[in-house]
Image: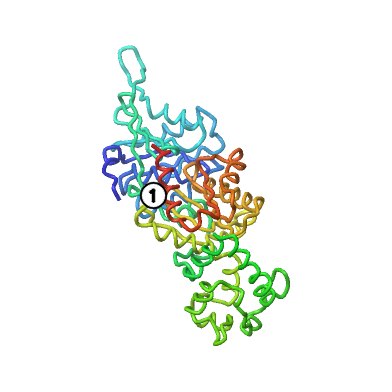
Amino acid sequence: MSTNEFEQYKVDHLFLLVGQNPLPNYVATKLLLHRGETAYLVHTTDTLDEAKRLKKSFESEFNVELRSLNHYESDAYHIQKEIAAKLKSINNGKIGLNYTGGTKAMSAHSYRTLFYEEIQDKTGKVYRRRKGMIFSYLDPRRLEICIDREDNERERLKVKPDTLQIPLITIFQLHGLNLKKNPTQQAQSPELAQELVKVFADKAKQTQWFDWYNKIFSQAARKDNRKWKNKTDLAKLFIPLDKLSLEIVEVFNNQQLLTSDDNLALGEVKKLGVFPEIEDLCKFLDGIWLEHYVLEQIKKIAHSQSILYYGLNFIIPPQGTKDGFEFDVAFTRGYQLFAISCTSDNDKKLCKSKLFEAYLRAIQMGGEEARVALVCCSDEPDTLKAEIADTLSNKKIAVFGRADLLNLSENIIKWIVDNDREAK
């Protein structure tokens, strides 16, 4: 972790204003507070839970005090009184204020209280700028910590990916969200997913695939239009592959799933350990393959793009949320969250719905810095993006369509590079 340029601005006492998104407070504390020193989390009644989660996340690295404004987040007198009371008890050490979070009133009056100190001179009480204070905020557009210097200039320190790497799990925990299970970094059957990408990238081959999948596979494996048959019945199935491309048949053969007469033997699936249950293969063929393909592409570029934390299937159960939700694939680059929604469909309405939901969740968790993409099989990804750009911030979204699938890793790198360019 390269934080040398932040060293001169690190403090021993850091006041932070807690807002609805605790991520900026987490970033500022990790970069601007000396290890073992104290963070003062100034919160309201509405942000008490966020402050408690921050405190828990810091318990092994920093001392933390919660400073409550109760319901007085817009009351100038109360804000100044609470900050000043704590300030008077600090006898030594460098002091800082990070005013990224909280309300505008909290920022203004906290800044004012810490900026000026009261002294006595021949004329009585006067106020002057307090020496040695470090005032800072996080600029989400440029991914920078901004320092207000005493010469009225502003120092901008870029938070690069190698400056601070934040695990995806930490971001979820800061929001009080518990994952249903640990995300996976291991794609299932990447060879089969790769062949299916080749199929879906070609309209003629895609039509051939759906003829087999809908008329043969689904007819045999489903007990109605939606539900799969039980494990016992699925294990008895031998499904002909004569209408499939030879490349896909070869993948099934390499995975030892074929009988001597080249039928797909579902009863062999569990023995190979690739899919935990036969139904998992069914879901994979139904469209989940695209998520695993995307995961494999992220894994492929992870080292070159400074991506340390990534995964698939971030499932949030309904407890603590309205309905629960799920990120298909996600990664962090530094502290910035990238969320990718996937669908093998090309239906415009469905694509828009998935992109919009992923956008809302990503911004909720990752703040304005979060970026969102949709990987789908649309032939008009630019049109799809343009139609939804009026609702969402165009710079925060990307849409990858059918023509982008075969070179997806390169397209994701371009997305990352464009994002870096926008942040300059």
- Circle 1 Cα neighbour tier, 10 Å, few/some/many (<14 / 14–19 / ≥20): many
In the image, farthest residue toward the right: 224
The residue positioned 48% from the left and 78% from the top of the image is 255
Residue at the extreme top of the image, as rendered: 123
Quarter holding the C terminus is top left
**Residue in front for this viewpoint, 179 or 97:** 179
Q: Is residue 123 toward the left or the right of residue 330 in the image?
A: left
Residue located 45% across and 62% down the image: 296
Secondary structure under tag 1 reads loop
Q: Residue 253 location, x and y as percent?
A: 50, 79
Q: Where is residue 372? Give x, y as percent.
A: 52, 48
Q: Which residue is mark 1?
A: 334
- Tell me if 104 is positioned left or right of 64 in this view: right
> In the image, 416: left or right of 270?
left
- Where does residue 15 sit, x and y in percent of width and height? 40, 38
User: Three-letter amino acid code at disc 1?
Assistant: Gly
